[in-house]
Amino acid sequence: MQSSIYNITGEVVGQVELDESIFNLPANEAVIHQTMLMQLANKRQGTASAKSRGDVKGSRRKVYAQKHTGRARRGDVKSPLLRGGGVAFGPKPRTYRQSMPKKMRRLALKSMLSSKVREGEMKIVEGLAFERPKTKELSNILTALKIDSSVMIVVEEASVNVLKSSLNLVNVRVLPCAQINVLELLSYKTLVVTVPALQNIEKLWRTVSL
């Protein structure tokens, strides 16, 4: 399975053979969806908390007599029905964490990478090396590659200059190849991968058999 390699001026400078066990799998939407939900759930802090009537400070004395007042039956001032009272069935700190088998997570990631290739949303570049942070330079590279949508740039290792060059660009994300995940791939339409990053991705996932 061949794919073109571009330089920073947008010209095709070669071809690369993609590993079909990673970049040519059928889309498994069910596994991708389940992985996305797991990642979103694991990002939740679960720190929301509300005071119940047992936590609210106040007297436990009954406000007035149960009967013969002509009014509704009323307990103490900490009742959820009264202003300043406790919250009935309010949130308490909890964990939203979910887990999935490793093989399912790997399959979801490979399915996403395959979808990017199949839909023509992945471009491979020779490399990105900036002597100093320069937003305009990175913007020109994306323009040369004819990218006008949200883009995730995957590099071999986190480069400070490349990262800082992307901070002022809208919908541009720079990520080391070891940190790619399904949620990030779903969040950005176009995927730009450097050749060294591609080699690392294939080396990492090729050693795993499904």
Image: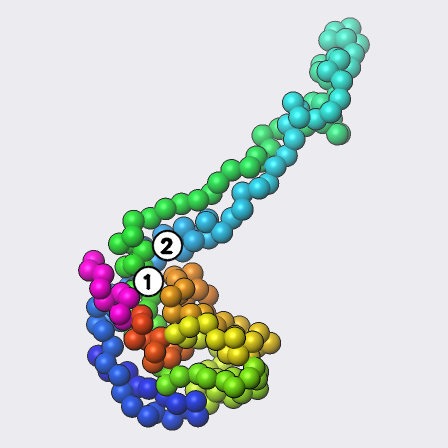
Instruction: Indicate the quadrant where residue 154 lies.
Output: bottom left
Give the extent of the magenta segment.
202-210
Compare marks 2 and 1 and give the one earlier in the sequence.
2
**Residue 205 counted in the magenta span:** yes
Q: Is residue 69 visible?
A: yes
Q: Residue furthest top?
A: 68
Q: Quadrant of residue 199?
A: bottom left
Q: Is residue 181 magenta?
A: no
- Marks 2 and 1 sit apart, C-alpha to C-alpha, by 9 Å
Hey, what amino acid is under mark 2? Thr
> What's the residue at 48%, 40% (across, down)?
95
Comparing 204 with 146, the one in front is 204
Determine the residue positioned at 33% across, 92% down: 13
Instruction: Determine if residue 25 is in view.
Output: no
Which residue is the site of mark 2?
35
Q: Identify the image quadrant of the N terminus.
A: bottom left
Residue 205: percent from left, percent from top: 27, 65
Residue at figure coordinates x 44%, y 75% from the top left: 153
Q: Are marks 2 and 1 in contact (CB under 8 Å)?
A: yes
Residue toward you, 26 or 67: 26
Mark 2: give few (<14), some (14-19) or many (20+) Cα within 10 Å.
many
The mark tally for this picture is 2
- What residue lies at 48% left-to-right and 87% top-to-bottom? 141
| Position of residue 94 measured from the top left corner of the image (x, y, whole percent) | 51, 38
Residue bearing mark 1: 109
